[in-house]
Amino acid sequence: MKHRYLISGGGTGGHIFPALAIANKIRKENPEAEILFIGASDKMEMKRVPEAGYDIQGLEIYGISRDFSLKGIWKNVKLPFVLMKAMRKARRIIREFNPDIAIGVGGFASGPALKVADQLGVPTLLQEQNSYPGVTNKMLAPKAKKICVAYEGLEKYFPAEKIVQTGNPIRAEILNLNRKDPKAYEFFGFTPEKRTVLVVGGSLGARTLNETMALHLDDFRQADVQVLWQTGELYYKNIDSKLLASQDEHVRIVPFIRNMNDAYSMADVILSRAGALAIAELAVVGVPTILVPFPFAAEDHQTYNAKALSTKGAAVLIPDSEAKEKLMPSLMQLLENPEECERMGQVLRTFAQPDAIDRIYEQIEQV
């Protein structure tokens, strides 16, 4: 039987990539399935989802502004009207598509989309990536049939009887990663003979990591270490032209890495934020990692994510405020200690949940 699946959410890679992993799993198990995404019209899902081969409709929607300037206050005044308009469009989209299930992964657009779906009698399922849920999923939880989570203790925020601990979905190409793949080195113009550091601050970039990297590129050259640095697209647009011009056989600076499996394949050490999706992927990859949590995440949940690993010796945690001082010494210390790298990678792999997407798909089909 041909089923129709509506998937909504986005705003950052932490929401978009789980959504795409779910869509890919559905398509693999049910090639005849019809899949439609609903996203926020000015967010990155409007680009990433079509690139992955799926249709998407955009809603003009945004969240509550915490900017107390006149502009921020005016945005909040307009928000109820923006929300009503988004719900009207979502209603039209959902009636036309007539889905059998609506899946929310968090982000602005999933609020109106799943609320309308429930009003129209479409069963809903939520996938929550973080240890501290976002506002949208907390709002939608009472009407959801199932809530797939990656962390324990979310009964504080969601109805306990609806929670299923599945883990976070990982992209298939990362699950099937070929470590030290010669094609990966060839793609990025690196050599397998040298150690490689991967720097990823999330899909939108990370200011602290970027500013620290900009100060230390010569240190990598002097240590004969290769560095692949994903800046995020916004930072890349404003990057010093001298930095871009300084790229050589040791340094690659890119706004966004689409083939993360190749980047992970080469990496000997990874510098990263501590978002839930990043943690899930890093655990599967099992490469020694330094985590610099984003300090302004809701309830500081990235720090809790990072502590779950660092207290077990599975990663190094460096607070954002200390990164410029401690990041490079910690990195060089790891690179000079292959035994510690091997031990840390082994411990990190014990956190992996490679079958998370199968568990999530099982819940979707039950609903």
Image (spheres, rainbow, N blue to C red):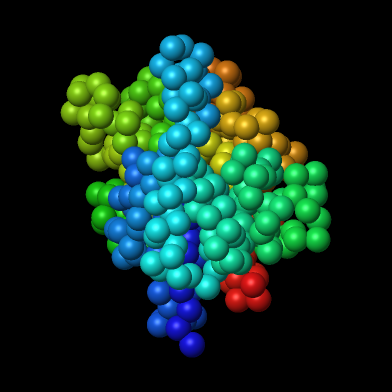
Query: In the visual, does 114 lie left or right of 28?
Result: right
Query: In the visual, does 2 lie left or right of 168?
Result: left
Measuring 27% from the left and 25% from the top, which residue is drawn there? 239
- Residue situated furthest bottom in the rendering: 1
Query: In the visual, does 103 lie left or right of 210?
Result: right
Which percent across, then down, holds residue 209? Answer: 45, 28
Measuring 41% from the left and 81% from the top, which residue is drawn there? 31
Measuring 45% from the left and 27% from the top, which residue is drawn there? 78
Vertical side of 85 occupied by 284: above or below: below
Count the marks: how many? 0
Question: Which residue occupies the foreground of this view, 25 or 348?
Answer: 25
Question: Which residue occupies the foreground of this view, 17 or 267?
Answer: 17
Picture quarter with the C terminus: bottom right
Instruction: Say whether residue 357 is visible.
Output: no
Which percent across, then down, holds residue 350? Answer: 69, 57
- Residue situated furthest top in the rendering: 69
Vertical side of 267 occupied by 166: above or below: below
Which percent across, then down, holds residue 259? Answer: 35, 56
Which percent across, then down, holds residue 255? Answer: 30, 39
Question: Which residue occupies the foreground of this view, 299 or 263?
Answer: 299
Instruction: Say whether residue 206 is visible.
Output: yes
Res 297 → quadrant: top right
Measuring 51% from the left and 44% from the top, which residue is drawn there? 107
Vertical side of 285 occupied by 200: above or below: above
